[in-house]
Amino acid sequence: MGAGGLATADMVLNIGPQHPATHGVLRLRVVLDGERIVSAEPIIGYMHRGAEKLFEVRDYRQITVLANRHDWLSAFGNELGVVLGVEAMLGMEVPERAVWLRTLLAELNRVLSHLMFLGSYPLELGAITPIFYAFREREELQAVMEEASGGRMHYMFNRVGGLKEDVPAGWLGRVESAVSAVRRRLPDLESMIVGNEILRARTRGVGVLDVATCEAYGVSGPIARAAGLDLDLRRDDPYLAYPTLFAEGGPGRVVTRTEGDCLARLEVLLEQVHVSLDLAEACLDTLATLPAGPVNQRLPKVLKVPEGERYTATENPLGLNGYHLVSRGEKTPWRLKLRSASFNNVQVLSQVLPGCLVADMVAVLGSMFFVVGDVDK
């Protein structure tokens, strides 16, 4: 019996699957006791398109166009995992110029992804202005990405053996100008987020995630590092040019916090933008010293991968992105399992949301920085 002798009962509330706060068609089934969340269950699958089965009936050149779509904010990073895995199974060496160009493009894509969330998260909390500043910087970088690849979201620039083609003449200079412009104007966006009293009140101490829960659920990326999990594949299991960039004295560093709340997750994202811009500048410096040369390897008309299996993981903007490739020596994979970052990052909501107020639910949900296509695959 509740206050005044009135009978009370828990209320079941559905958030989504079509709701402005859910980044797409994610559904949350929450049980409430008054204004307090008792339990929360993420219900996924509304966007499922069976990408892993589609991979099995495409050859290795065609898979890339499917693989870059599950996290539509990180198309270049999605492509990388597939081509790196195939190249490793083929024992193929990629030209040095292609390695550094891939690293540069991956970091530019990382900044694009982070800027989207740095603009959209305050929007979900009621602050409209930051998203306009975030998109101003995104447009600056998307212009150079589009010039190189021809695409604004789905670049399709990676190929097994390197890149589709070399970048246009003068492109490196234009990237340098774009990176400088973004770095110069980024304080405009930061000033609206860092130290904002309303934002801090909505995010500090809210939705706390600890290291043990991250490890239990396989949470990775900025969300896990904000909880204190010091893990970044660019440093811990480096690929591309990251062994050089994350070597002692290099520009690479892993951003972590220990609080594990919504504010810490936002701060990690913001600081990682600066690190990625540093890495992009280092790539530009190296590319300026490299002689002109090929950016890909010649491939046979029918590309067959030797029999065997391999798991290839990369550090995508949202966390660990892995492809488990099983080959039977044919021109199509026998199996290609995708381990997407957002899938694990969303499942942990069932542990983070209970105990929160309904008013804080959107703040927690938005701070998980997920893409629904990356969840559903």
Image (tube, grey):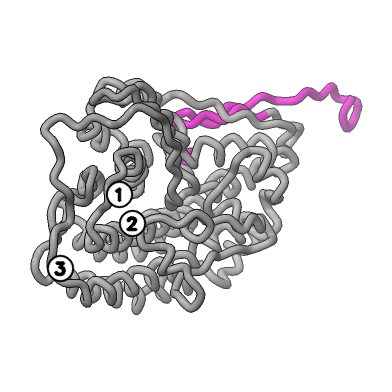
Magenta stretch containing residue 2, yes or no?
yes
| Cα gap from disc 3 to disc 1, whole angstroms | 18 Å
Q: CA distance from mark 2 to mark 3?
A: 16 Å
Q: Is residue 147 left or right of residue 126?
A: left
Q: Position of residue 209 (x, y in %)?
A: 68, 49
Q: Is residue 37 above or below residue 187?
A: above
Is the residue marked by circle 3 packed among few (<14), some (14-19), or many (20+) residues within 10 Å?
Answer: some
- Asked whether disc 2 touches disc 3, contact meaning CB atoms under 8 Å apart, the reply is no
Label 3 sits on what residue type? Trp
Residue found 61% across the figure and 61% down from its top: 264
Which amino acid type is marked by label 1? Phe
Callout 2: helix, strand or loop? helix
Q: Is residue 213 in view? A: yes
Task: Indicate the position of residue 154 as horizontal and vertical percent values.
Answer: 24, 44
Q: Residue at x 17, y 49 (%)?
A: 297
First to last magenta residue range: 1-30
Tell me the SS state at disc 3: helix
In the rendered structure, which amino acid carries the disc numbered 2? Ala
Q: Relative to 96, is 24 above or below? A: above
Q: Give the Cα separation between the discs numbered 1 and 2.
A: 6 Å
The C terminus is located in which quarter?
top left
Q: Is residue 323 left or right of residue 83?
A: right
Q: Secondary structure at mark 1?
A: helix
In primary-sequence order, the first of circles 3 and 1 is 1
Local crowd size for mark 1, using a 10 Å CA cut-off: few (<14), some (14–19), many (≥20) = many
Q: Residues within 10 Å of mark 2 (few under 14, many from 20)?
A: many
Query: Could you say which disc has been placed on residue 76 in the image?
Result: 1
Quadrant location of the N terminus? top right
Which residue is found at the position 58% from the left and 30% from the top?
A: 42
**Residue with the mark numbered 2:** 106
